[in-house]
Amino acid sequence: MVGMTPGPEAGPEKRSEPSSGTEPIAGRADRLGGLIIVSVVFVLSLGIAAWSQRQARGPASLPPGPPTTQGVVGWQNAVNPVETLNAARSLTQRSLLRGFIARGVRSDGTIDMRVGTGHVRYSFQSPPGKGPQPDSEGHRATRWRFCGEQSVELNQRGLRAEPDRSGVLCPPVHIEPLPDPRCTMRDIWKQAMARGAASSATAQIEYYRAQAGPAWRFGIAGTQHGFSVYGDCERLLLGAEAAGSVP
């Protein structure tokens, strides 16, 4: 109408904006959930890494137990070192036999442990990188070089493992482990007596890996009665064929 002042035109509807410094509740919940997931994954990763490192080092070396006579065949005055091998093996975490040395062995193949000279040392190792490994981080890169070593001793008190030596390096050249003996110390003595050894004496007998393979070494202190034979107790080993020792 003439003379009337038109009112202001209706503009677009204004929307209220969230105030500065605020965040929708749903957004905060999503962010918090994401942080929790990341934290859980991180903690699990650390746990898996620690477990993998522990597995790479192998089992921990167990402390030696007290002396025992369980499994010692012929205890105490007629101990058979060959037949006691399984009992010795049960006291170590090392799976490979490297040999044994028996002192005070009589002509019947046994030892009287009531006599101070009677003694047996069994030697065991592990395959490269197996068994207890050194804990030092610096050794992890060369883990495969460690075979470790542990001796099990048999004396007047019984059978007992010595402390495990996890830091012993593997031999520079691969050496096959020894099989269980195929014959007895009495068989070795028979060969010695055929060569003139007195049956009343006591001997040191070793089972070891010679250049020729599994072997036995016989000796009586203070005499010339000493020789080595192959693991079958029959073939005499001469010269370089007999070279070798128990670690």
Image (cartoon, grey):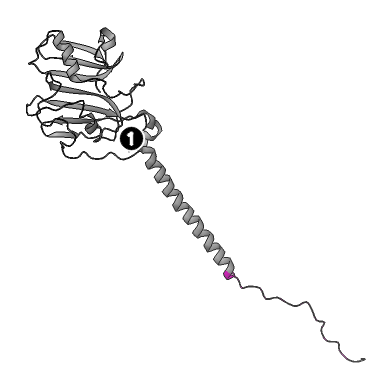
Pick the residue in front: 139 or 228.
Answer: 228
Q: Is residue 90 above or below residue 234?
A: below
Bounds of the magenta segment: 4-25
Crowding at dot 1, Cα within 10 Å, few <14 / some 14-19 / many 20+, comes out as many
What amino acid is found at the position of numbered circle 1 in the picture?
A: Gly
Q: Position of residue 34 (x, y in %)?
A: 54, 59
Instruction: Give left or right: position of 149 versus 102.
Output: right
Q: Which residue is mark 1?
A: 131
**Residue in view at x 26 percent, y 12 percent:** 242
Inspect the magenta stretch and tell me whether residue 239 lies in it: no
Work out whether residue 22 can be spotted.
no
- Give the main secondary structure, helix, strand or loop, of the magenta stretch: loop
Q: Position of residue 45 (x, y in %)?
A: 46, 49
Q: Is residue 25 above or below residue 131?
A: below
Q: Disc 1 on helix, strand or loop?
A: loop
**Residue in view at x 45 percent, y 51 percent:** 44
Instruction: Give left or right: position of 246 versus 140.
Output: left
Work out whether residue 183 can be spotted.
yes
Q: Position of residue 2 (x, y in %)?
A: 93, 91
**Residue in view at x 28 percent, y 38 percent:** 61
User: Which of the 4 image quarters holds residue 157?
Assistant: top left
